[in-house]
Image: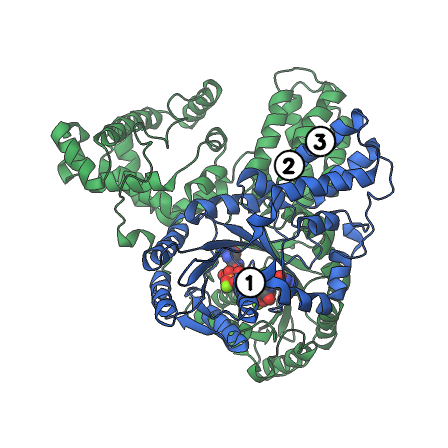
Amino acid sequence: MFDRLSDGFNNAFRKLSGRGKISESNVRDAMEDVRTALLEADVHYEIVNDFTDSVVEDALGRDVTKSLKPGEEMIGVVNDQLVKLIGGDQPAQPGVPKVTPGPTVVMMCGLQGSGKTTTCGKLAAYLKRQGRSVMLAAADLQRPAAVDQLQTVTEQVKGFPGDGTVTCYAEPHKVAEYGKAVGVAVGVCQRAMGEALKQGVDVLILDTAGRLHINDDLMGELEAVKKAVPPHQTLLVVDAMTGQDAVNSAKAFHDRLGVSGVILTKFDSDTRGGAALTVRKVTGAPILFIGVGEKLDKLEEFHPERIASRILGMGDVVSLVEKAQQEVSEEEAEVMAEKMAKGELSMDDFLKQLRSLRRMGPMKQLMGMLPGVGQMLKNVEVDEKQLDRLEGMVNSMTPAERDDVKVINPSRRRRVASGAGVKPEDVSGLVKQFNMVSQMTKQFSGMGMKGKLDAAKKMQAGGMPGIEGMPQLPGMGGKGTTKTQSPKSRYKKRKR
Amino acid sequence: MKLFKSAIAKVKKGLAKTRDTFVGGLRSILIGRRLDDELINELEARLIQSDVGVKTTLRLIEGVKKAYRSGTMTTGDEVLEYLKDELKALWPAQDRELRFATSGPTVILVAGVNGVGKTTSVAKIASALRDQNKTVLLAACDTFRAGAVRQLEIWSERLGVQVVKGQEGGDPAAVAFDACEAAITRNVDVLLIDTAGRLHNEASLMRQLTKIRDVTTRKIEGAPHEVLLVLDATTGQNAVNQAKSFTEATDVTGIFLAKLDGTAKGGVVVAIHDEVGVPVKFVGIGERPEDVEPFDPVAFVEAMFEDEAPAARG
Ligand SMILES: Nc1nc2c(ncn2[C@@H]2O[C@H](COP(=O)(O)OP(=O)(O)OP(=O)(O)O)[C@@H](O)[C@H]2O)c(=O)[nH]1
Ligand SMILES: Nc1nc2c(ncn2[C@@H]2O[C@H](COP(=O)(O)OP(=O)(O)OP(=O)(O)O)[C@@H](O)[C@H]2O)c(=O)[nH]1
Ligand SMILES: [Mg+2]
Ligand SMILES: [Mg+2]
């Protein structure tokens, strides 16, 4: 999501490095690239200007121009400033605080369609896991079926793990057409509060209707809710794909309601996510969670360092490792490592790894998390269809062929090709590629950590032969002509 | 555009406030100003803040700079006229018309990422078509999101148009299939297909959308006659990726730019034109069915430069 932003920094620092000494104007030049990258990432225009100014000032203050490694020192400066900007004073305790007497009241607010109702459900599922009892209040009385949506979400939350409980408070008969129910939410929230007290729930979450920050009546309604049922947390739900306008909406919501925390949704998109910086800067409120999918378990605590390192092109390795751990067990990983060390990788292993990899998320997104390699491959179009084709080919191989690709002679090659709906050259390409990869992994496995890093650096410096075209397997140019096999199980990740 | 005349008349009455800032009676930062470097900088700032994007902003500014240096452009008024002409040329009127089938039902497929306003936009188009005395059938192909079917059903009840729905959690392509059959047997003029929100970088969901499209093509000749991509005007540069991926998956024929009633300018559609070439057909300016207008490039440019610092609004 921040990959383009990373590009900008990388370019900028490549310019700086290797120059020994740099001048003030070098620093300013480098920041010009950073500026473009931030703008392309949707950080607000003025915030970008402020940011680059303060980085330059800080850098010159530390006198990076006298430093022996100005590039590295500049990265340090940018990193510090960036972490300060998006991280700042994160609360010591993430999540929803406990208060006595309860319940902790959380009010969701934000523009239309930003993801409030879904996030209410995610937060409830998160709290359920912590063993807390939650009530969701349906305070959106104007969007058609908003109440049904929250009720359905509540039912879904019940199916998620955890000792907590969840209920929904709603007054469906109060629903009215747009503009005809302004103010009704206040009473609904008050009565929900009464019910929450009676039931003794730990947390009451108010799902309010989406509204424009310039709609005076509807903004007034939220002020009234705030007065009537004082929330402990007022959370602004923001779409991570938001552009420059984030500055206006965040400011207006903050001015009128005093935002205490931010949730960024739809971070599973390939957005560069500059709105994170904007909203953070405008409200001063911490980013508490990010939404990374439509399902109710797709809520993650926000880690500013991860995002910052990602911006700097160091990659979000932490997230990647976590994802990998979800997909591959430790024993599996060990077995695989051993095989790799011996150069005994089979097509079956290859397929297994490819599948786990794909379950971790779209390839492009994964690459964005990787330092170095992700950078090198950034311009390569990762075609998921080709990955389908790869799977198709391996699926068409017999166990013996998968075990040892050397047995694949021309007639077997034709059979595999026709089974997968590809050309025989495609199969040759795959085999060649596979041999290369297993050779490489064998070499890699022999090295210690330092050796691996050095090798990786060498590849990066010299440009790794062959890898440029990696996803573009030889002979796999023909699009649309191939028929891919798609085992039903492959996308069971999300049945729709 | 003829199709939406009645809708526009209503909008004009009902949305005086919105139109005030949106089109009518605007004071522009460009009007009455002498063209100089400072104004060019302001122009750049304004274009960027409208989400036009760095590359496209530089392209637009380049023309102004050239004309400024050669002395052919000397005032802000001329800049505004220049930009209006530029954008009008990008989207000629004929590109902004809705396409109809020459015979049989017209199929309009509506798609986009999550929460942009697809379902509401379907209701808006249905309402306008109904006002043109066309018979409309809605297809509730979002079988995934909580309450989605019910949402469309409520719109169908309010608008008095028919709806075909499947089971929640069912196969959306199957619903599309049923809807096409119904459109034929009931002999409706227009079939409007609402689909689930999906991120453009989710390959499997994009394939599902292609499948829905293909089902309509197989059932009805020439279908879908329109594939409308709904974009949220508040979205930044990511909308370019959205346009690219959706076009790849379904050959998008037009953009429905929703939520233009806020302070966002939706300038990313200019970048989308540069990179994908898809025209904008409609804009959404509110949550009610009548809150829709045909896209007007001139009004669009004017709104970008209206004399009110965006950050000071609200
Ligand atoms: N991919 C993805 N989709 C999300 C995420 N959060 C919400 N959505 C989707 O975004 C769309 C809008 O979500 P809602 O929860 O209905 O948004 P809302 O803010 O309540 O909308 P209004 O009440 O109309 O203002 C739905 O399709 C959700 O499934 C997320 O983190 N990732
Ligand atoms: N202000 C404004 N709000 C809009 C507009 N169009 C839609 N909305 C609101 O945006 C929210 C989301 O609209 P939907 O039509 O449900 O969006 P969707 O794309 O179908 O959402 P999913 O199906 O969940 O992906 C609702 O609260 C709508 O009322 C518009 O033009 N202006
Ligand atoms: Mg909602
Ligand atoms: Mg919808």
- Does A126 sit above or below residue B307? below
Residue found farthest to the front:
B102
- Does B268 sit above or below residue B209? above
Quadrant occupied by the C terminus of chain B? bottom right
Residue A279: percent from left, percent from top: 68, 51
Task: Please tell me whether mark 2 sits on a helix, a strand or a loop.
Answer: helix
Chain depicted in green: A
Chain depicted in blue: B
Q: Give the residue displayed 14% in from the left and 39% down from the top.
A: A398
Mark 1 within 8 Å of ligand 2, using the beta carbon: yes
Q: Within 10 angstroms of label 1, few (less than 14), some, or many (20 or more) residues?
A: many
Task: Provide the residue designation for mark 1.
Answer: B121
Q: Give the residue displayed 82% in from the left and 42% down from the top.
A: B30
Residue A455: percent from left, percent from top: 42, 22
Q: Within 10 angstroms of label 3, few (less than 14), some, or many (20 or more) residues?
A: some
Mark 3 → mark 2, Cα distance in angstroms: 11 Å
Mark 1 → mark 2, Cα distance in angstroms: 28 Å
Among the 4 quarters of the image, the one containing residue A190? bottom right
Task: Provide the residue designation for mark 3.
Answer: B63
Q: Chain of mark 1?
A: B
Residue A334 shows in this picture: yes
What amino acid is found at the position of numbered circle 2 in the picture? Thr
Label placed on residue B56 = 2
Quadrant occupied by the N terminus of chain B? bottom right
Are the residues flagged by discs 3 and 2 from a single subunit? yes
- Residue A78 located left or right of residue A438: right
